[in-house]
Image: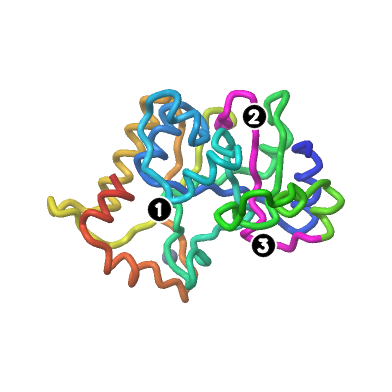
Amino acid sequence: MQGSEVHAVLTKIGATQLHHANSVTTSSAFLEQRGLLSRGFVEDGGLKQTPQSSDDKDKKYDIWRCVFLDHVDIHFRAGRKKGPNQYGPVLFILDLDILLALPAGSDVLVTRSNPIHWYDDQPDGERWFQSADELGKNIRFGNFDKMLVIRSPSGMLDFPNRRARIMLDNPQRQFSSGQDVYTQAEERLRAAALTGKIQVGIQQHQCRSDCICIDKYAKYTHEQLEFWFT
Ligand SMILES: [Zn+2]
């Protein structure tokens, strides 16, 4: 689908922003390279990214060189219960209009279900919406399994006007070194933005009142905190 077609459908259901969540390590690579990067782009460039459980399936189903976006903030919905976003504590927020200015040759696909649930020999029509018309008839605001998958020729999506907006989880924890996790993660991201000459706005993630991410983060080991926040 064309970016403009998907833009029209999402506007109709009330979406105004797109979201991408990741670890601090991978997000730092994004800021240094000035855009959201597909897993394949990072790997090919020898850059650092944290492994994801979906990596093998992404390669198998030919979405390894795509950039994933959600029309909702799935922080509240990840996993079986509300809690931290399973893809990481750094949430990039992009204006929906980025779909109107995609690089020439880009294709926008929308999944019918999370690719983690796909199986071999599954018909294409069960994995992807086949047209903007079909998408419009089936998507509702908050359908977080209907993910936008952008296939751009370069495998990346530049931050418009070299600006990025981030909401960062504050787990209210310390690393084993005694340093505050949020403070150190924010410093790391700001340093990466400086390297990439990106103007970055970082604010603490605003949780719903019934969010339980702090309870979940309280149970993280120091290794888990380091995995996601350094
Ligand atoms: Zn939360």
Q: Is residue 225 left or right of residue 20?
A: left
Q: Find the distance from the CA under tag 1 to the CA under tag 2.
A: 25 Å
Residue 29, which numbered label? none
Looking at the rendering, which quadrant does residue 216 occupy?
A: bottom left
Q: What residue does disc 2 label?
A: 152
Residue range highlighted in magenta: 138-159
Check disc 3 and report its element: helix, strand or loop: loop
Q: In this view, does 87 lie to the left or right of 151?
A: left
Q: Does label 1 or label 2 sit earlier along the sequence?
A: 1
Q: What residue does disc 1 label?
A: 89
Q: What residue does disc 3 label?
A: 143
Local packing at callout 2 (Cα closer than 10 Å; few below 14, some 14-19, many 20+) is some
Quadrant of ligand 1: it is bottom left
Q: Which of marks 1 and 2 is in front?
A: 2
Local packing at callout 3 (Cα closer than 10 Å; few below 14, some 14-19, many 20+) is some
Check disc 2 and report its element: helix, strand or loop: loop
Q: Which of marks 3 and 1 is in front?
A: 3
Q: Does label 2 or label 3 sit earlier along the sequence?
A: 3
Give percent across and percent down for residue 229: 31, 49
Q: Which amino acid type corresponds to the residue marked 1 in the rendered image? A: Pro
Ligand 1 closer than 8 Å to label 1 CB? no
For the point 80% across and 55% down, the residue is: 12
Give percent across and percent down for residue 155: 57, 29
Q: Is residue 192 left or right of residue 124?
A: left
Q: Does label 3 or label 1 sit earlier along the sequence?
A: 1
Local packing at callout 1 (Cα closer than 10 Å; few below 14, some 14-19, many 20+) is many
Q: Which of 81 and 19 is in front in this view?
A: 81
